[in-house]
Amino acid sequence: MTDHDHSNLYRFLRKPNSIVEKSIKFGMEERRKQREEILLKIVKRENSRQSHGKDSNSPK
């Protein structure tokens, strides 16, 4: 790690906590959205694969 990296890291840690938390929350929010989209795709695929006669509540 160079001195430059250190000063950047130090500056980041010195930022008000709210800014740091916002950036962390934003990253988590993005990942959560992506995960939800993937889950929705899986559910849609499962539903379209099931025959209509089956009970949708039955374990897969």
Image (cartoon, grey):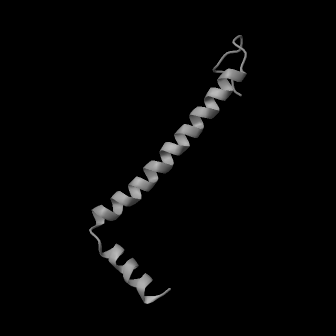
Q: Is residue 6 left or right of residue 11?
A: right
Q: Position of residue 30 (x, y in %)?
A: 46, 49
Image-quadrant location for residue 25: bottom left
Q: Position of residue 11 (x, y in %)?
A: 33, 77
Position of residue 52 relative to residue 1, above or below, is above
Position of residue 10 relative to residue 54, above or below, is below
- Count the numbered circles shown: 0
Q: Please report the residue visible at 37 percent of the width from the left and 83 percent of the height from the top.
A: 7
Q: Residue furthest front?
A: 4
Image-quadrant location for residue 44: top right
Instruction: Point out the image quarter for the C terminus.
Output: top right
Q: Please report the residue visible at 26 percent of the width from the left and 68 percent of the height from the top.
A: 16
Q: Residue furthest top?
A: 53
Q: Please report the residue visible at 59 percent of the width from the left and 37 percent of the height from the top.
A: 39
Q: Position of residue 28 (x, y in %)?
A: 45, 53
Q: Is residue 31 left or right of residue 19?
A: right
Please state which of residues 41 and 4 is positioned toward the viewer in this rendering.
Answer: 4
Position of residue 18 relative to residue 6, above or below, is above
Q: Please report the residue visible at 67 percent of the width from the left and 15 percent of the height from the top.
A: 55
